Image (tube, rainbow, N blue to C red):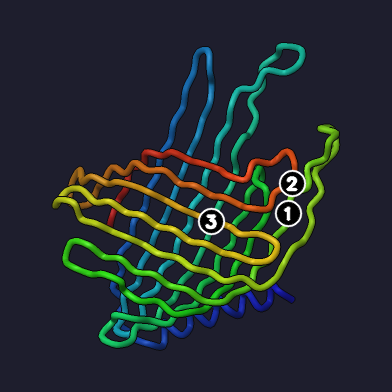
Amino acid sequence: MFKKYLLLAIFSIISSSVVADEKRPWDIEVGIGAISTSGNTQSTSVQAKVDAKQNLLHWQNEYIFNSLFKQDEVTQDDNTKVKEKTADKYLASIKSAYLMEAEKSYLFGFVSYADDKFGAYRTYTTVAIGYGNWIYSTPTLHWYAEIGPGYFQGQKVITNPDPLLPDTLVDQSGAIVRASTELKWEITKSAEFKQTLSIESGSDNTRILSETSIATSISDAMQMKVGVAVAKDTNVTEGKKNTDTTTFINLIYKF
């Protein structure tokens, strides 16, 4: 039943923006980073992200897809070496904002879905609505914040003490309050600082997502971005860490 409501919410967000205006200007960023090592240590990691913003007359929509894959060489008890996946996760989200009062404030709807094969939660779905406002806006600095009620559904991982047996997944769901903010600062014509932060707080768990990055221009359409992404869950089981940190260097293509 929840999946039906989720699909209905996504359809409502997209359809409302389509009807709102026929003009469809887009700001799209596609980023990818890959690291491969060989020799004494062998590992492969790939990160990809798509961030698409649609700027209409009264609507601003954002579609994000982010994925991370990592494979490391692991030494077994018999000293043999095999390659194992150590990270395999992706996140998809849609946010649609209806702009009011000369675009200084807005009402929004938000849907996100995360799948993490090695995380404290196997899946994590969030639906939220609320109000947002631009705290500060100049030609070089933009800062907004938003807050609203929502609902989450997740599969919490209960680690099995026997490594030969699979972990147990426990369904959780409930009401949450979601707050988020984004700060974007154009330091120079070729350098940009960006900070995003979201907090989804409920009785079962509080999830905090943060990303800090600096991007420098290579050309009009290309950027090199370095940054740190942090994901934290306050309620995790024994054997799982409550914070995941990813340091990345990505090549960004803008069009």
Mark with earlier residue (3, 2):
3
Q: Nearer the viewer, mark 3 or mark 1?
A: 3
Find residue 146 and report its image quarter. Answer: bottom left
Q: Say above or below: 20 vs 224.
A: below
Q: Is residue 9 left or right of residue 53?
A: right
Spot occupied by residue 94 in the image (x, y as percentages of width and height): 48, 69
Q: How many angstroms separate mark 3 from mark 1 (CA)?
A: 16 Å
From the viewer's side, name the closer residue of 61 and 206.
Answer: 206
> How many residues crowd mark 3 within 10 Å: few (<14), some (14–19), many (20+)?
some
Q: List the residue tagged with mark 1.
A: 156
**Residue 242 got which mark?**
none
Mark with earlier residue (3, 1):
1
How many numbered tags mark residues here?
3
Find residue 107 and report its image quarter. Answer: bottom left
> How many residues crowd mark 2 within 10 Å: few (<14), some (14–19), many (20+)?
some
Q: List the residue tagged with mark 3.
A: 208
Spot occupied by residue 154 in the image (x, y as percentages of width and height): 69, 61
